Image (cartoon, helix red, strand yellow):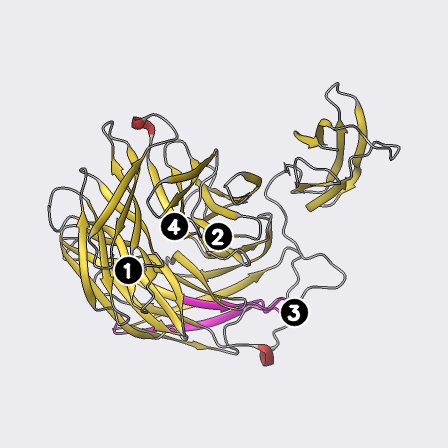
Amino acid sequence: MNKQHLIFIKCLLAIGVAFPLLSAASEVLFLKYLNGGGSVNVFQIQKLENGCIILGHKSISDGEYMGYWLVRTDANGDTLWSRFQGGIGEIAGYDLRQTQDSGFVITGVTTADSGQTLDVWLVRIDENGAPLWSRSYSRSEDDEGLAVIETMDGNYIVAGFTMNDEWGRDLWLLKMNSQGDSLSSRIYGFDGEPSQRFLYPQKLEATEAGFIVAGYNQTGGNTFLVAFNTNLDTLWSQVFSGVSTQHLVRTENGYLSYGSHYNDLGHETQIHLVYTDQNGMELQRYSHWFQNSHLNVSTASPRDLMFGGNVTTYSRDDGPVIFVRVDQYGSPMWEFTVQTDLALKPAAIVETGVDTFTVAGYIWDEEMSKDIWLMSFRYDSTKAVFDTTIIDTTIIDTTIIDTTISDSTLAIYFRPDQNKVVQFTPAKYQLYSGHPNPFNASTTLRFDLPAATFVTLIVYDLTGREVVRLAGGGYQAGYHQVVWDGSNASGGPLPSGIYIARLTTPGYSKSIKMVLLK
């Protein structure tokens, strides 16, 4: 049976200018569909040499037979091989890492052995996806493995959770040898009472001394970073309130933990970026709200922070696919949407080349089961942008999908206008903390304006006395920043201490604290 759908790719610029397509600069990209012979979902996509690997979950016979599904693709998105391993009951792989011998290790959850409880699961496969061995580890009624790494000596570390005595979830670390035999394990509970702890590790990052676990407490909505040595002893731990994390990457001065949180009532997403030093101490955090967007996936790259998801409304949450690239402060740099009559849901995104990204997601088919789709796109900030391209996508026997493009290949290009600032209109008024803070020489204050308005930005001392006016007058909608060098209105130096910056518009007012150190 043949099925046809039209896919519309539309690039959005805040200034509303559409540039002509430069077909000579176009590059071939792809949109593929993969049918797994059951209902499938996607947990992860990783870049490999000359292609990608997708880790998903597949259920057959109305969920009676379940397991993980691996798909290895080449650089054009064509399938090289796919593997399924499952059984009666729940089997799922949540995290995958490539091993030193070019094979893979996967951790997740299984009920195949006990049939009654959820157990941590670890499976080792070769470079072609063939299973070498698998092991399960049980401690309570609900144990799951969520992240895994291979150590330099060929052992494995799994971070997951286990049920505590008060029905909460504590962090569970397991160390295994190259054959999956258990060497040691530790349980850690923190950030609240046992019944209020639901600790979900998301990422493991190897360090010179051992490794770092990044995750969040589902109850409190806090992010945690905990460093361990190879013996699973704690080196340091930090908890950041009010933020969630999906990724942890190294920076020049320490680490960047970032993620997103979706507000169901407001149909908006808040992304969080928390910068720390080498010991996990918070240096600076940034956040930004995106209205009418459910941004639930992001890249694990500190150079290109890309978030993806769906446009949302009050009547539906499966609207057009949207991708937003943000800068180091979390502010949007550009975005584009994919308009389609299909309910595409992004599930994972990875940077696969210079300014090139590959996205994996799922789609409900006519039989109400899920298929995987795979899309790659590229942008070039020095070239042109096209407004709309129509792609005729044909599904042949529900297993093979290719794309034919009417006038040009699928590519995303942007050319900055020399006479205009390319930016998006913010969703709401916002004044951010100064960066750096505390500061010595100077600090930068950033604020967002969703509409043109009159603005004042005034610095006060703790007695309420005005010491300097940093901004005053009419401002256009957009993202703005001013630099304060710690001097008063006359240009003279101010003493060390705490100062208050207050942003005021006719309908908005917010104050932040700044610490000046001389």
**Residue denoted by label 3:** 382
CA gap, disc 1 and disc 4: 14 Å
Report x, y in % for residue 123: 22, 58
Earlier residue among tags 4 and 2? 4
Residue extending furthest toward the bottom: 24
> Does residue 505 appear anywhere in the picture?
no
Q: Earlier in the sequence, mark 3 or mark 1?
A: 1
Which of the two labelled residues, at mark 1 and mark 2, occupies the earlier sequence position?
Answer: 1
Relative vertical location of residue 82 with respect to residue 215 in this rendering, above or below = below
Please state which amino acid type lies under the numbered disc 4.
Leu
Q: In the image, what residue occupies the spot 54% across and 66% down?
A: 355
Q: Which residues are magenta?
A: 375-398
Residue ID for mark 1: 105
Residue of label 4:
204
- Crowding around mark 4 (Cα neighbors within 10 Å: few <14, some 14 to 19, many 20+) is many
Distance in Å between CA atoms under marks 2 and 3? 28 Å
Q: Earlier in the sequence, mark 4 or mark 3?
A: 4
Disc 2 marks a residue whose amino acid type is Val
Residue 436 place in picture, x, y as percent: 66, 40
User: Which residue is rendered at x = 53% and y = 38% of the image?
Assistant: 281
Closer to viewer: mark 4 or mark 3:
4
Q: Which residue in the protein does label 2 denote?
A: 249
Q: CA distance from mark 3 to mark 1?
A: 40 Å
| Residue 482, quarter of the rendered image | top right
Q: Position of residue 372 (x, y in %)?
A: 32, 63
- State how far apart marks 1 and 2 are (Cα): 20 Å
Secondary structure found at label 4? strand
Q: How many marks?
A: 4
- Disc 1 element: strand
Residue 30 included in the magenta stretch of the image = no
Q: Quadrant of the C terminus?
A: top right
Q: Nearer the viewer, mark 2 or mark 3?
A: 2
